[in-house]
Each structure stands twice: as structure tokens, then as C-alpha cells.
Image (cartoon, helix red, strand yellow):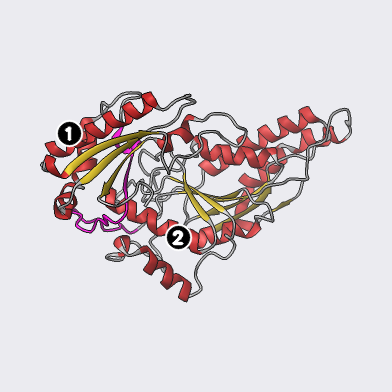
Amino acid sequence: MTSRLLARAGIAIATVIALGAGLTACASATAAGAACDQSQKRNLGVVAGSTANAPAASLPDSAVAQLTAVSKSNGSVTVVIPSGTPQVMGTTTIGSTAQDAVVCQNDQRNKLTQVTSYINGLKAASPEVDFLGSIDQAARNLGSNPMGVLVMGSGLQTTDPLNFAASGVLYADPAQVVSDLTSRGLLPKDLKGVTVYWAGMGDVAGSQQTLTIPARSNLEAIWTAIVKAAGGTLSLLPEPASGGAASGLPAVAAVPVEAVQTKTDWTKPIVIRNSDLLFTKDTATFSDATKASQVLSGLVPSIEQNGATVTITGTASKDQATNNTADTALSLRRADAVKAALVGLGVPESLLTTAGVGYEWCGWKSETDASGKYSDALAEQNRSVILTSAGVGLCG
């Protein structure tokens, strides 16, 4: 096994390497089984660590699936904490070089467990948050066949050149943000052909005010545009980050969120995640009607100011179904429930119409992981309600 560790990696990540050494050494003398395949290594950059403006870092299932795929390929991870000054923790292999198939699999599992635990325990060491610089650092050791870059966090950077704590930046035109970064040569340099998997974007904690739906939508649009301009693709992982911020963390400036959002861009679809609306499984009933009302209330002024009919479209996960009939009906009922909630908040019913498409629509994403196994966590990304103005498609 080889490993390149920087000084800040410390004992924790070194332990990850050492714990697998015993099995590997024994395996080298045993050639009875097939050796671990080293020919298709895939590497992953990881940007993770608890910060004061987001829930305590905890890898969701879909993120663990990425690490699992790296482990099975005998690849490596480069870990960076998105502090105000990014902390590069080092690069380590999480696969195996064992010469026995059984020992190889045990080795991979053990290292995966250790690395996962290590990542979940990371915390920022300096004030503020810098995702842009951290992604740039994490992407530098990916090789020719990368798994991608995994990012955990709110996406609310509070350092230049992308300081969302500055007035108005959260509502800036994504194209203008990209133009500014490009002109200054500040886009990440190693993202060509790379997928950036992001967990918890827009999910906040501590003193950071909760984002409105339009604010969250523009935040996602800004990062999508940045990653695309750098040559990559942004994929938002479906599980929301929840809970409080970890204690004792360096301060992070609060990003201002407009109490009454009047800048909703109705030339684009407005996506509301199921994790925000919290429908009870397989029903059109809100499990927490008060929270759903709070989520939707931020849209009321902009719907009224838009002055045109807004279509509320429900989408659904496939869940291995063989036809779309039941899912179309469920997604329509959920759209109707959102309409009823908006009318209850004061939106004129004449401004709202509904539709349901089930899982047959342009934005549907695969619900199987890298091994081909169905994942409810991945299916969750297909459960949503989308608001569009006249002439705007579900996928923009």
C-alpha cells in the first residue's frame, strides 16, 4: 500500500493505513485466490468537515456508495476540510493489494469503515468557509479515470472570491458569477470530465438563517454554473443534512437571506424537494403541515408578482415499478396538495394549475448505485414538486 500524507493529516488518517497492514502482509504470502485488481483504480476527492453554518458533517448513504466504489477499485481519496483556509489532510489508498480474494474484500471493508469514520469526525480549524478553493485542492490527484469529487456542506462560502455573506451575492446572476471567476482565473482547474457529488447544499444550522426556496434554487444554479464552466458536472445527492451544528467551531459569517423574496426567476423551474415538503411515504399528506406551510410561504409574494399562471407538477420515483400509472396519480395528488396549501396561504386559485408526471419526465435520474442495486436514497432525488410559469419546461 502506498500513501502520501501531509503534515496535517496527523495520527487519525495514518491509523487508517496501519490498521489494514496486518491482513495485507498475511495475504501477500497466500496466492490461493485472485489478487485485488489494480488495473481500474478510481480516485475520489473529498471536501468535508463540520462548519459553524451547517449541520454536523455525516456522510449520507449515497456518499458512502461513492467511497465504496473507490474501495472496490482499490483507489484512493484526497481529503480537504473547507475551512476559510482549506486544510489539505492528505491522500490515502482505501483499497487493498492483497493476493487473496477473501482477504482483499475484508481489507477493503475495514478501510472503508475507518475512512468513513475519519471523514465524519473532521472539523474546520479556521474561521469562515471556502468551498471553491477546497474543491480545487481535492481535484488535483484524481488521475485519468476519476470517481469524482464529493462535497459535503451548505455551499454558502464566506470568503472571497465567492463570499455569499456579502450583500446580494446569494441572488447574483450565475452567468455573471462565472464570468467574474473566469476573468480572474479562479475556476477549479482539474474538473474537466469530473462529476462533483454534493451532499447538503442549502442545508444550514447555527446562526445561519434558513434559505427560502428561491434562494436555495439560485445557490444551486450558481454552483451548477461554476462546475460546468470548469468542465465538470454537478450532481446533488438526495439526502438532506439535518440537525444542529457541531459545537466549538470557528465562527462563520451569516449569509443574508431576504425575508420576502421578490427576485424569483420565473424563466426557470422552481424545484421543491420532497425532503422539504415531507410527504408521508406513498401518500399526498404532509407529515408536518406546519413546516410545509413555512417552506411554501416564501413563494407566495413572487407567485402573485409574477401575475401569470404557475403550473405545479409532481414527480415521483420509479421504485422498480413496471408502469407509471400509480406514480402519475400519486404525483398529481401531491401537486394538488401543494396547490391547496398555497391557496390557503393567500395565492389566488386562478394563478395555479396542477399536473403529475410520475417518473416519466426529462429530469428523472437513475435509482441504482454503482453495483446496479436499487437505492432509496438515490430514488429520493426523483420525488419533488416543480413550479413553472407559462412556456417554461420542467428541465429549464
Residue on which the image places disc 1: 340
Q: Position of residue 17 (x, y in %)?
A: 70, 43
Q: Is residue 279 left or right of residue 111?
A: left
Q: Is residue 178 above or below residue 317?
A: below
Residue on which the image places disc 2: 130
Q: Label 1 neighbourhood size at 10 Å, few (<14), some (14-19), many (20+)?
A: some
What residue is at 48 percent from the left and 37 percent from the top?
Answer: 60
Look at label 2 and name its amino acid: Asp
Q: Is residue 173 left or right of residue 311?
A: right
Q: Position of residue 215 (x, y in %)?
A: 29, 53
What residue is at 77 percent from the left and 27 percent from the top?
Answer: 102
Q: Is residue 129 visible?
A: no
Residues in magenta? Answer: 253-278
Q: Quadrant of the N terminus?
A: top right
Residue sitting farthest toward the bottom: 183
* Mark 1, secondary structure of its residue: helix
Which sits earlier in the primary sequence, circle 1 or circle 2? 2
Whether 273 is among the magenta residues is: yes
Q: Position of residue 39 (x, y in %)?
A: 78, 45
